[in-house]
């Protein structure tokens, strides 16, 4: 059964964009114009080399039973808060065929992708995971699991020996077993505890993110 919240008008609903977008993680300041970026990933305060890889869809979305137009997707908001706290490299997973801004059209497409066990193509270059110890893997919950493009990502890259910590944003489903799905899909990796943030509360997730990062030994 596709996940379909009721459509109601949402007068004047405002979305506060997070201060932290993923231009840079805490110490990964953007390079000055004309300089080359170093291929070496920064190390977090705890010594781990961390990639924050996430998929997020801006546009019309669920909002407390109504709809809202998000300039920045909820998962990207959480990814930005993570990047505020630790030294890491960000990677945004984008679909080569972008998802519609329209909520219902996205639900329809996702149902088709789930039903056909699709592997949506990822736009652009994929990251090399070799330099990283830890991958923070983020997505929304779509129809009670991670979007199929996350399977494209996990099946295409080599996660051997990596620690994977999942994070999701959701409306009602919580983590929805995404941690177990990744553990099954990535037997060569160690999949740790996941973080689930209600999408509407994404901008206020700092304390939960702090706890999750500490539990994962990524924050002192
Ligand atoms: C296609 C689609 C399917 C969704 N299915 C679910 C669901 O099954 N359970 C749930 O809790 N939320 C569901 N949601 C709500 C999103 O998980 C939630 O709004 C999330 O924060 C969106 O993250 P994003 O803005 O980063 O894409 C769905 C949203 C979309 C667009």
Image (cartoon, rainbow, N blue to C red):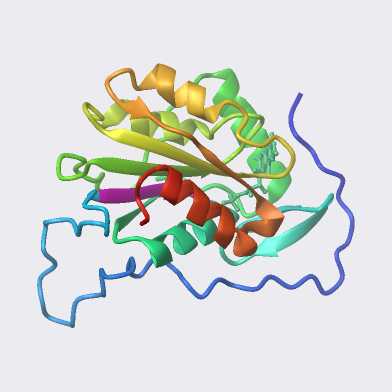
Horizontal relation, residue 42 to residue 56: left or right: left
Q: Residue at x 84, y 49 (%)?
A: 65
Magenta-span inclusion, residue 197: no
Residue reaching furthest to the bottom: 33
Magenta-span inclusion, residue 51: yes
Task: Please name whichever residue, 96 or 35, is drawn nearer the observer in this view of the structure.
Answer: 35
Horizontal relation, residue 110 to residue 122: left or right: right
Question: Relative to residue 71, is residue 149 depicted above or below?
Answer: above
Q: Quadrant of residue 163?
A: top left
Q: Residue at x 35, y 60 (%)?
A: 86
Is residue 6 shown to the viewer in this render?
yes
Q: Position of residue 185 (x, y in %)?
A: 39, 20
Q: Residue at x 46, y 63 (%)?
A: 80
Image quadrant of ligand 1 equals top right
Question: Relative to residue 219, is residue 203 depicted above or below?
Answer: below
Q: Quadrant of residue 187?
A: top left
Q: Position of residue 4 (x, y in %)?
A: 79, 38
Task: Please name whichever residue, 216 or 185, is drawn nearer the observer in this view of the structure.
Answer: 216
Horizontal relation, residue 205 to residue 191: left or right: right
Task: Please name whichever residue, 75 or 107, is drawn nearer the observer in this view of the structure.
Answer: 75
What segment is highlighted magenta in the picture? 50-55
Q: Residue at x 51, y 51 (%)?
A: 211
> What quarter of the picture does the N terminus occupy?
top right
Q: Position of residue 203 (x, y in %)?
A: 61, 64
């Amino acid at each position: 059964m596709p996940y379909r919240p009721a459509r109601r008008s949402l007068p004047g609903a405002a979305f506060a964009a997070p201060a932290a977008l993923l231009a840079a993680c805490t110490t990964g300041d953007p390079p000055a114009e004309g300089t080359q970026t170093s291929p070496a990933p920064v190390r977090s305060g705890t010594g781990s080399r961390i990639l924050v890889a996430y998929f997020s869809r801006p546009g019309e979305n669920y909002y407390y039973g109504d709809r809202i137009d998000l300039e920045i997707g909820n998962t990207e908001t959480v990814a930005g808060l993570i990047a505020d706290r630790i030294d890491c490299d960000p990677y945004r997973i984008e679909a080569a065929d972008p998802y519609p801004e329209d909520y219902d059209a996205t639900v329809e497409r996702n149902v088709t992708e789930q039903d056909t066990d699709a592997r949506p193509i990822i736009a652009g270059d994929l990251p090399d995971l070799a330099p990283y110890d830890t991958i923070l893997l983020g997505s929304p919950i779509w129809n009670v699991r991670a979007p199929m493009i996350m399977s494209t990502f996990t099946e295409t890259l080599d996660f051997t020996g990596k620690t994977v910590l999942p994070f999701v944003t959701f409306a009602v489903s919580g983590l929805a077993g995404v941690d177990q799905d990744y553990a099954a899909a990535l037997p060569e990796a160690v999949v740790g505890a996941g973080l689930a943030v209600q999408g509407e509360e994404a901008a206020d997730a700092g304390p939960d993110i702090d706890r999750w990062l500490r539990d994962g030994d990524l924050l002192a």
